Image (cartoon, rainbow, N blue to C red):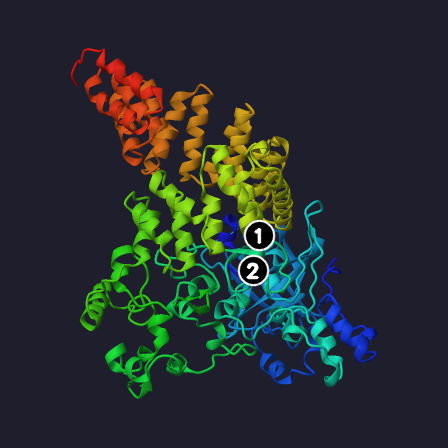
Amino acid sequence: MADPALHRWERAGLAALAVIVVTIPLSLLRGPSGAGRAATDATPTFVGGAGCVECHQAAAEAWRGSDHDLAMAEATEETVRGNFNNVEVSFHGVTSRFYRRDGKFLVWTEGPGGTMAEFEVAYVFGFEPLQQYLIPFPGGRLQALGLAWDVERRRWYHLYPDQDIPADDWLHWTRNGQNWNGMCAECHSTNLQKGYHPDSETYTTSWTDIDVNCEACHGPGSRHVAWARVPPMARPELPDLGLVVPTAGISPAALVELCAPCHSRRAELGDWDHRGLQLLDHMLPSLLVEGLYFADGQDLDEVYTYGAFLQSKMYARGVSCRDCHDSHGLKLRYQGNELCLQCHQREVYDSYDHHFHKKVVEGRPSDGALCVKCHMVERPYMVIDWRADHSLRLPRPDLTAEIGTPNACTQGGCHDDRPLQWSVDAYRRWYGQARRPHYGTTFAAARRGEPSAVAELARLAGHPLQPAIVRATALELLSAYPGAEAAAAVRAGVAAEDPLIRHTAVSNLAIADPAERAALLAPLLSDPVKAVRLAALSNLAGVPRELLKSYQQEAFDSALAEYRTAMEYSLDFASSGMNLGNLNLSLGRAGEAERYYRLALAIDELFYPARMNLAVLLSGQGRNDEAETELREVLAAYPDNAEAAYSLGLLLVEMGRPDEGLGWLERAAAALPRDARAHYNLGLLLQKVGRLDEARAELEQALRIEPDSLDLLVALADHLIRRGLVTEARPLAERLVALYPDQEIGRQLLAFIEGSAPRGG
């Protein structure tokens, strides 16, 4: 199971958990003609992996014992690997005991509310290098215990060794952050139907196979099984022999997308039906965002391979997962460098002149000469699970020096005892100066809020040779920058061929004029990709309906229903409640918006975006005291949250408490050096309380961030004129007239200045 901490900010009786057994109807066995028609006409359904073994014994044998086979199982003598022989372990002040009674596997540990209690293990989760244990809870829930078994070291350990997580936290093992039904189930079982019921907050989760079986990749198999039951000479001609998802004769990119639904960090848009649909019809892969990836795109958090592989030259050249991994057994096709030498010339790449490492050191094989040690750096997840970065990148110690990202030499487990400069010098000595620019430097600058990043982000976003996930990430980062160049790049992305880029552009397109927004985005309500349709709907939710043509209104209503269904599917996550709150607020349904914001906070009271949006809603209704309470709740949990400090400052000013508000605005502006609005509002308040020099400094800082802003030019010009500094105000007024010839304010200011006698500075 993944570390769910960052899911907080993403879209992240037990009788109902019965195994569904699907049998082959007798009508399919009655003869060639009937069976032929059934094989051709029947809607495919899931039959279970056991129905495939008879004809596919070699594939089944390779699969048996694989990570897919062992993804999940009932807790039995054969499947439980942990020590349940009355063993005690203590972590974070809690002493837990693992023991057995009457053939059951039990644990005495901290439960809901911090109360010690006994829990029965119902299922095991995974096999190696660790195994987790699932505990049944009321309402059809299964919860993943925070203590796991280290298979190699044969010990119990805590999955969060450095975090003392209280029992009321979303991340505690009894809460939603460790809930199997919503966090883990879909990728550990086949034909998983989550079955969440928001009204009762219960689950009726079901599956066809408890593990990752044949139909997880090949799709529901009833049509293929029916076809196979027919005597060979009577079998009808069916595309792909009746298989729903073809796996032969498809492109490498399509093969990668077969694996992506489970091997990607993502937000889900509904149950995965295993029918090989366009990936973004079912889920939305995460971009190379801060907290998940390092600035240069290396894995930071658990991101499950897909996002990294999309960045690689291998993917661009048509390499797919099965070129390296056996499709059924999942093992590597070759060991050591032989895996890479399938494609790369041995005499060039498996040589000292390329890797500069000895193959044998002190009589033993050396890791230094292995391709993967330089090009697929490993990091530990879940404390002990070392996983390789699949971006297959060049080692770049120079980037470590420039932007602080890891490198394979001194931070990849090989030469950790050496200083960074040692690896930089060695790299230059062997390969020369690294001159190739890398998007990591641009992403790092953008994460720091540097204005200089805009031009390069815009170039990356439109560059056809850059990976789609890089281009989409550039668009996401551009959304933080106001200005014509950033806006033009995002607008261009709306028409991109790749759906991930298109979705990101639509999600981040900021157009104030509703008519212009409708003209640009309304056609995308009928986009062939679901995620794009939902993004268009979300962006258009506040647009007056009359701005849409009649057929666009129909598309809007259809997309609205899709959006609600997708969000209701994941209402066990706070983010979906917030999204539905935002939607209803845009649609003018404040009561429903408040209900969903509060529902999100009931799931995770520390999910501050929902609390911030609730505060905005309450303030808009004149319920300022309640809004203040919500913002102070955010700041109590997250004292460094500059957005909350900024919002609280503005609210206090509105409530007639400017002295209190000033302190919060000063705090926010100091933490948001690139936020023009924070400096602008602080400047206006400082002007109001008579701190004029400080006010001018803040207004000038705001204008440096957004030099073409109408509001900021007017504010600074007005400030200078009020102080009698009309000579200094003149260039600002002239700039207003030049930039905004249709706006009367520039000419009015200029006329006033020209009619005033300058009084110096």
Disc 1 from disc 2: Cα separation? 9 Å
**Residue situated in front as seen by the camera: 666 or 449:** 449
State which quarter of the image contains the C terminus.
top left
Identified by mark 2, the residue type is Gln
Left or right of 563 on screen, residue 350? left
Q: Position of residue 470 (x, y in %)?
A: 39, 56
Q: What SS does tag 1 mark?
A: helix
Identified by mark 1, the residue type is Lys
Q: Earlier in the sequence, mark 1 or mark 2?
A: 2
* Disc 2 crowd, CA 10 A, few/some/many (<14, 14-19, 20+): some
Please give the residue where the numbered disc 1 appears in the rendered image. Answer: 530
Residue at point 51%, 50% (across, down): 10
Name above or below for residue 90 compared with residue 172: below
State which quarter of the image contains the N terminus.
bottom right
Q: What SS does tag 2 mark?
A: loop
Name above or below for residue 530 compared with residue 237: above
Please give the residue where the numbered disc 2 appears in the rendered image. Answer: 278
Left or right of 489 on screen, residue 253? right
Residue at point 47%, 72% (across, down): 320
